[in-house]
Image (tube, helix red, strand yellow):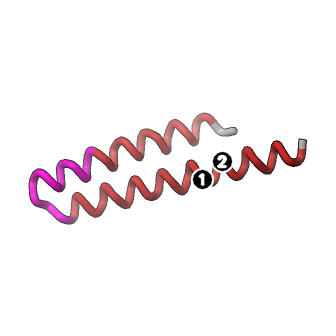
Amino acid sequence: MSTEKRIEATAKNIEGKLQEVIGELSGNPSDKAEGKAKQAEAQVIHTTENIKDELKKAID
């Protein structure tokens, strides 16, 4: 398990949520879309790390 990658992904997710809210409040669809994209990227990182963990468990 890469704790560092999980922390980075969590930070990116929080950043994305904030950017999405700011975009919503300001009426800026570009900020809102970028925020959602950051959240999706964070989810991919988390999923990748989960798969790596499961593969490691299966090998051990």
Q: Given the current orientation, which residue lies at the most extreme left position?
A: 26
In the rendered structure, which amino acid carries the disc numbered 1? Thr
State whether residue 34 is above or below residue 53: below
Drawn side of residue 52 relative to residue 30, left or right: right
Q: Quadrant of the image for the N terminus?
A: top right
| Magenta residue span | 18-29
Q: Please identify the dominant SS of the magenta region.
A: helix
SS type, badge 1: helix
Drawn side of residue 50 relative to residue 24, left or right: right
What label does residue 47 carry, if any?
Answer: 1
Q: Quadrant of the image for the C terminus?
A: top right
x, y percent for residue 19:
25, 49
Q: Which residue is mark 2?
A: 50
Real-space Cα separation, disc 2 to disc 1, in angstroms:
5 Å
Residue at image location 72% in from the left, 49% down from the top: 52
State whether residue 49 is above or below residue 4: below
Drawn side of residue 59 relative to residue 8, left or right: right
SS type, badge 2: helix
Q: Is residue 59 magenta?
A: no
Residue at image location 40% in from the left, 53% down from the top: 39
In the rendered structure, which amino acid carries the disc numbered 2? Asn
Q: Are marks 2 and 1 in contact (CB under 8 Å)?
A: yes
